[in-house]
Amino acid sequence: MRSGFGRCGQRVATMLGAVVVMLLIASPAAGDSVSVITRDAGGGSIEATVQSSVSCENSWCAWFTHAVERHSSLPCSGDTTFIRWVGNYHEGGATSATESFKFQPFFPRATKLCVFLTGPGGMTTTEATITLPVGYGMQRSSGYNCSDFGRRASAQYYLNLYPDDPSGLDADSDGAACEHLPCPCGAEPIPAEPIPAEPVPPPTARPAPIALPSGKGRAHLPYISTNTFGCGRIKVAAGDGWMLSDFSPNESHPFTAKIELKLRGPIEKPKKFVTPGAKHKVGFGRLPAGRYRLTIRYPGDAWHLPSGTKKLRPKVHRCRR
């Protein structure tokens, strides 16, 4: 895969439905916190160190942290155009972590790094505006073309930075860049970059694609809340906890995946699929009394390997007349 301004590649040519936007939940659990420190790593890269901690009411909880680059004039939001990093998925008793990553900024001169901590209590966010050395980020150049951008959104941000269109991304001059590229398509208005006094030569070298293990990233299950069960029924609440790992930290990669729930017991029930979101409840009803096995897994897709499985053993009670 290429860097944030490179081609997403053939692996992401087809999207599985709509991108799940990571919603900013207004009331995170008390005690949840996240902070970020950045430094110049040289060679056009920035290193960020993220410190996260959560307050878990129970002995088991699950959480993860991810970071998105935004233009310095834009607020942090659920925009996934420039996902720069997704941290490790934590579950069990772990309540804090310190993790570091490097990324090549897209926006020149100054950029913003938005860090989101998603846990049982909701989402906590922090941000850092980074003043960049000269030459960092996407510079004005006539040497790029649409194949250097993986999605319309990133190409549109480049056109917004340099509206004189030095690389000819807007062939029909209608204000939309690279209209044949796949979505996400939207780019928010941002200030244009000043035109340098001296022309910038075309790039002589571009970052090589970063290969994924076996050509795919690995998806981890979102956290599953305590299942409830009773007279003839089982209900499972699947929370918003998807993460991706083992992919290029500079790749603009959407969160798209589904949970597979399959119930097995005295009778077989067909499996159900749940798209990750803020919270989903899935019910299995009209079941005979007995012990069941509920298997929760992600079956995999063109981009991700199958996840491991989680198994719960709920008991269904007989319904009294």
Image (cartoon, grey):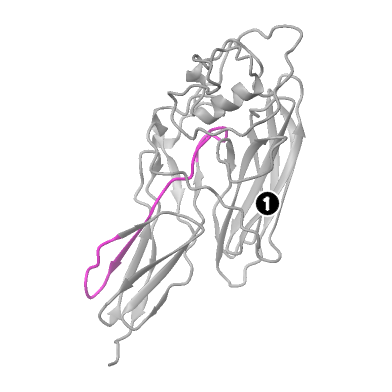
Residue 5 falls left or right of residue 193: left
Q: At label 1, which amino acid type do we have?
A: Thr
Q: Residue furthest left?
A: 267
Q: Residue at x 39, y 72 (%)?
A: 235
Q: Where does residue 133 sit, x and y in percent of width and height? A: 76, 24
Magenta stretch: helix, strand or loop mostly: loop
Within 10 Å of the Cα at label 1, are there few (<14), some (14-19), or many (20+) other Cα atoms?
Answer: many
Q: Residue at x 37, y 48 (%)?
A: 306
Determine if the magenta segment contains residue 252.
Answer: yes
Please say if 47 is above or below 308: above
Q: Where does residue 12 sit, x and y in percent of width and height? A: 41, 33
The answer, for residue 3, to whether it is visible in the render is: no
Residue 110 falls left or right of residue 6: right
Q: Secondary structure at mark 1?
A: strand
Please say if 249 is above or below 204: below
Determine if the magenta segment contains residue 276.
Answer: no
Please say if 319 is above or below 100: below
Quarter holding residue 316 = bottom left
Residue 293 falls left or right of residue 19: left
Residues 207 and 285: in front is 285
Q: Residue furthest bottom?
A: 321
Query: Circle 1 sits on which residue?
Result: 125
Q: Where does residue 315 sit, x and y in percent of width and height? A: 35, 79
Q: Residue at x 27, y 77 (%)?
A: 286
Q: Which residues are magenta?
A: 246-271
